[in-house]
């Protein structure tokens, strides 16, 4: 008789959490007149070991977001046999753009033309274009990075003209402590800004917004990518 291996308690908890999370995303999408398939769940996997990511992949997850390059690269190597889509969602530093351009599929935090130019120059010619999102400081928060909303359309046109990059859309991170009304207003403002960029000549189709505590508000305002860590994996392990 074939005896199948039993899942570990942590894998069982991950499966339960993922099922509940997908149900919440689906419900939020339906309430907004959208479908679950229009929202990509990006599993924010910082602090999680490669084995945990492999377990998540076996549950059907394909998109993973990493914040720290030094932590991410060993995971990319360990999971090189898996058909995963890697998103770099951390702060971009000019001296670290080459491995990001070479190894990742999406970059969520471009807020300067210089960074975009480096990514374009360093993207391998044999690789498909690198999907890029502009990070917008939509809440005018001095503690957050991002291009000012008023400067976004001009930056979008400049980045869209670069080779080996595919400018896909906009991204934002909101300050903590906003109530639901202010969150919805900020996410709605990013959606309107994307439409403004398109009216000026770009062809953007992606909005990366929403995290564990507010992704339902983001989905209601048109998010195509939600970046979720704690609600999926639980509290981050201590370093």
Image (cartoon, grey):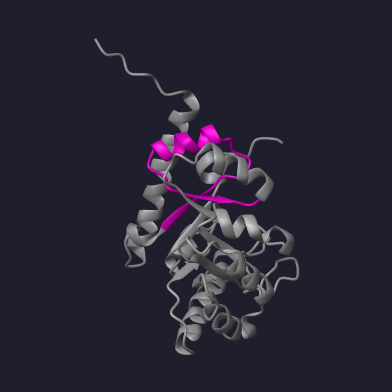
Q: Check the image and report above or below for 5 versus 71.
A: above
Left or right relative to 162: residue 25 = left
Residue at x 63%, y 40% (from the top left corner): 47
- Res 181 seen here: no
Q: Check the image and report above or below for 196 versus 117.
A: below
Most distant residue in the bottom direction: 200
Q: Check the image and report above or below for 65 versus 3.
A: below
Residue 80 image point, x, y percent: 49, 41
Image quadrant holding the N terminus, namely: top left
Q: Determine which quarter of the picture holds residue 60.
A: top left
What's the magenta region?
Answer: 40-68
Q: Determine which quarter of the picture holds residue 61.
A: top left
Residue 181 magenta: no
Residue at x 43%, y 64% (from the top left corner): 224
Tell which of 97 and 138 is nearer to you: 97
What number of labels is visible?
0
Most distant residue in the top direction: 1
Residue 5 image point, x, y percent: 37, 19
Residue 127 image point, x, y percent: 48, 60
Residue 50 magenta: yes
Left or right relative to 217: residue 239 = right
Left or right relative to 155: residue 6 = left
Image quadrant holding the C terminus, namely: top right
Left or right relative to 239: residue 174 = left
Tell which of 2 and 180 is nearer to you: 2
Most distant residue in the left direction: 1
Residue at x 66%, y 79% (from the top left corner): 148
- Res 69 seen here: yes
């Amino acid at each position: 008789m074939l005896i199948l291996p039993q899942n570990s308690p942590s894998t069982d908890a991950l499966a339960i959490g993922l099922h509940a999370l997908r149900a919440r995303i689906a419900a939020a999408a339906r309430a907004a007149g959208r479908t679950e398939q229009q929202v990509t769940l990006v599993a924010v996997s910082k602090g999680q070991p490669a084995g945990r990511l492999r377990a998540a992949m076996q549950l059907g997850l394909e998109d993973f977001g990493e914040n720290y390059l030094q932590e991410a690269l060993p995971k990319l190597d360990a999971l090189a046999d898996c058909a995963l889509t890697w998103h770099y969602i951390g702060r971009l530093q000019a001296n670290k753009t080459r491995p990001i351009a070479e190894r990742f599929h999406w970059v969520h935090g471009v807020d300067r033309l210089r960074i975009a130019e480096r990514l374009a120059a360093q993207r391998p010619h044999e690789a498909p274009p690198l999907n890029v999102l502009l990070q917008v400081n939509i809440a005018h928060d001095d503690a957050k990075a991002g291009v000012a909303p008023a400067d976004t359309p001009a930056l979008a046109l400049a980045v869209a003209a670069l080779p080996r990059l595919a400018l896909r859309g906009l991204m934002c991170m909101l300050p903590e402590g906003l109530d639901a009304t202010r969150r919805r207003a900020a996410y709605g403002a990013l959606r309107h800004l994307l439409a403004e960029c398109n009216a000026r000549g770009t062809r953007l189709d992606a909005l990366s917004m929403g995290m564990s505590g507010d992704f339902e508000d983001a989905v209601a305002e048109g998010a195509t990518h939600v970046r979720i860590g704690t609600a999926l994996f639980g509290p981050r392990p201590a370093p």
